[in-house]
Amino acid sequence: MSGGMDARSVLDLLDLTLLDHDASEADLDALCQRANTHRPAAVCVFSEHVAYVRSRLDDGIALAAVAGGFPIGDDDPSALSESIRVAVKAGADEIDCVLEPRDAEDFPREPELAMLLAMREASAGCALKVIIETPLLGERSMRAVVRMALAAGAEFVKSCTGKRGGCSDEAAGILAFEVMRHGVTMGDRRGVKLSGGIGTKSDVERLLGVLHSEDSTIEGPARLRIGASTLLDDLVD
């Protein structure tokens, strides 16, 4: 891979994803076998699959649970909290949650803050990745909701689910800039997860070029993840 990044370097950032409520045990076994062979940063599944995957995933690979509504986010903080707690109890190391956009001039405001605080409290002890759904947002709303998510304690801001549009270069740059801004302002370093339509090494290279043009310190799995279901095929073929 050009730009000094080989397949192993991408695997170290990869959240290998299987989000299918109807996934069979055979499907989950195949996912775990691939993960145990290629060792991505994490495996990402729905919360109801966490316990099964946990029992079959090798040590050293994080297990991320998508909790709450997906791709449409929950609007009830209590229901979201319960969903997250179930995933954490089942063995999740990380929690991915959609913060559902509202088509309103006052987005984001108190309803979004309530959801973010519920996510943060229920996921205590786990890395929290807040899915922003950037394809549905203009620049002002995107920046505002990223700032709110970081202020509420999210370790990562994530570009989108991929179900309502992919990760654009503009979104990657805005997320990176806002994480950099938060770090300068607050003195702590948060992370970015890029997901949505990322299927090849060239997609990764392009998006990371944009991201690193805003903040070159966002690197390594503690601060940078790539969420994808098909990227592994391109990396190992």
Image: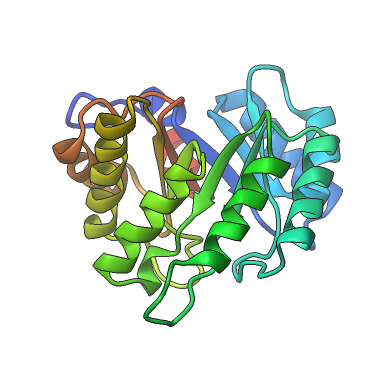
Seen at 44% across and 67% down, the residue is 108
Residue furthest top in the image: 59
Q: In the figure, residue 21 lies in which quadrant?
A: bottom right
Residue furthest bottom in the image: 104
State the image coordinates of residue 103 (x, y, percent, origin top left).
44, 82
Asked which colour scheme the image uses, the reply is rainbow
Q: Looking at the image, is 124 positioned above or below residue 166?
A: above
Q: Is 158 displayed left or right of 68 in the figure?
A: left
Quadrant in the picture for the N terminus: top left
Q: In the figure, residue 139 lies in which quadrant?
A: bottom left
Front residue of 94/225: it is: 94
Residue 221 can be seen, yes or no:
yes
Seen at 44% across and 43% down, the residue is 151
State the image coordinates of residue 178 (x, y, percent, origin top left).
28, 45
State the image coordinates of residue 142 (x, y, percent, origin top left).
33, 62
Q: Looking at the image, is 113 positioned above or below residue 153?
A: below
State the image coordinates of residue 214 (x, y, percent, origin top left).
17, 40
Residue furthest front in the image: 110
Q: Is 35 displayed left or right of 149 in the figure?
A: right
Seen at 66% across and 25% down, the residue is 36
Q: Is 200 displayed left or right of 195 in the figure?
A: left
Seen at 31% across and 38% down, the residue is 182
Quadrant in the picture for the C terminus: top left
Residue 167 can be seen, yes or no:
no
